[in-house]
Image (cartoon, rainbow, N blue to C red):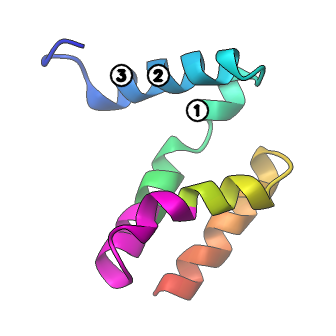
Amino acid sequence: MTEDKDPIQTAHEWLEEAATTLGLDPHDATALVRELLDLTKDVAHNRFRPAAPLTAFVVGLASKDVEEARANIAELKEAVQ
């Protein structure tokens, strides 16, 4: 990875690669990047920093598709406030 690359673009590239490796739709893997980053930022600042990435994992476990994940993110953002 070069240092001059946009971090969000680099994250998208990795998520697309990871999704393809796991047999998932790459578009689904990148659809909620901003929302997940906002949620994990809120968790890190308002709850407990190490719980932030684990919260994203829980959203994934609880969601059958992108729309359900979006609803789960919104619900957790309310709980974190």
Q: What is the distance, in whole Å, between disc 3 and disc 2 at their CAs? A: 6 Å
Residue closer to the observer: 18 or 68:
18
Determine which of the numbered discs, if any, sits on residue 14 in the image. Answer: 2
Q: Position of residue 24 (x, y in %)?
A: 76, 25
- What is the magenta range? 40-55
Picture quadrant of residue 43: bottom left
Residue closer to the observer: 50 or 34:
50
Picture quadrant of residue 70: bottom right
Q: Is residue 52 magenta?
A: yes
Give yes or no for contact between labels 3 and 2 (Cβ–Cβ under 8 Å).
yes
Seen from this angle, which residue lies furthest top? 2
Q: What is the distance, in whole Å, between disc 2 and disc 1 at their CAs? A: 10 Å
Could you tell whether 55 is left or right of 67 in the image? left
Which is in the foreground here, disc 2 or disc 1? 2
Q: Amino acid at mark 1?
A: Thr
SS for dot 2: helix
Question: Where is mark 3, residue-wise?
Answer: 10
SS for dot 1: helix
Could you tell whether 11 is left or right of 5 in the image? right
Can you say which quadrant of the picture contains the N terminus? top left
Q: Main secondary structure of the magenta part?
A: helix
Question: Where is mark 1, residue-wise?
Answer: 30
Above or below: residue 56 compared with residue 24: below
Q: What residue is at 68 percent from the left and 16 percent from the top?
A: 20
Q: Amino acid at mark 2?
A: Trp
Q: What residue is at 56 percent from the left and 16 percent from the top?
A: 17
Q: Amino acid at mark 3?
A: Thr
